[in-house]
Amino acid sequence: MKQISSRFSMAVHTLTLIATMPGECTGDIIAGSVNTNPVVIRRIMGMLKKAGFIEVRAGVGGASLLKEPSAISLLDVYHAVEAIDKGHLFHIHNEPNLRCPVGRTIQVTLHDELAKAQYALESQLAGTTIQQMLDQAIVNKSSQ
């Protein structure tokens, strides 16, 4: 099974960091915080910009949120940076052996379970915002 890429966690990190430093956050600052190549961050920032979450000043750089952190759910971020096939997080293998009693029914049986799992994940992400991530990051910082 294909693992969800790290783009999602990097995008959440990026938006949370921009919320702490509006207008001052450049791709290089974000790349330093994420500890990755600035090209990767620029690609993610492009996706976030296309989704309408950020604006980036040309020239000197510096990104700002276009929405309040409380108005951006993790599900919104996930949809902005993760490409899922026809709305399905899980892909079920094609063409099982129909002469096998399991092969005949596994796609329908597994589809229902995977749909429930995807719904649970999406519900959890929809209920969490960038503001909550920011609040938690501040709490964790003060406890260290």
Image (spheres, rainbow, N blue to C red):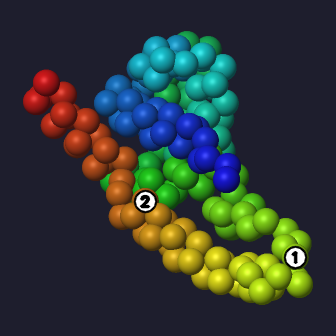
Q: Residue at x 55, y 19 (%)?
A: 36
Q: Is residue 100 above or below residue 59?
A: below
Number of the label disc, if any, that sits on residue 16: none
- The amino acid on which the numbered mark 1 sits, given as a three-letter code, is Asn
The answer to whether 30 appears left or right of 97 in the picture is left
The answer to whether 4 appears left or right of 129 in the picture is right
Question: Could you tell me residue 30's position as x and y percent?
Answer: 47, 21
Q: Nearer the viewer, residue 83 or 98?
A: 98
Question: Could you tell me residue 73's position as x and y percent?
Answer: 43, 56
Farthest residue to the left: give it: 143
The residue mark sitting in front, 1 or 2, is 1
For marks 1 and 2 on the same chain, the one whose residue lies earlier in the sequence: 1
The answer to whether 49 appears left or right of 101 in the picture is left
Q: Residue at x 18, y 34 (%)?
A: 140
Disc 1/disc 2 C-alpha distance (Å)? 36 Å
- The amino acid on which the numbered mark 2 sits, given as a three-letter code, is Leu
Residue hosting label 2: 125
Regarding residue 61, the answer to whether it shows in the image is no
Regarding residue 8, the answer to whether it shows in the image is yes
Res. 137 image quadrant? top left
Q: Is residue 86 above or below residue 50?
A: below
Judging from the image, what secondary structure is the residue with disc 2 in? Answer: helix
Q: Residue at x 59, y 26 (%)?
A: 41
Q: Nearer the viewer, residue 140 or 66?
A: 140
Q: Residues within 10 Å of mark 2 (few under 14, many from 20)?
A: some
Res. 113 image quadrant? bottom right
Number of the label disc, if any, that sits on residue 97: 1
- Image quarter (top left, top right, bottom left or bottom right) of the C terminus: top left
Question: Could you tell me residue 81's position as x and y percent?
Answer: 62, 46
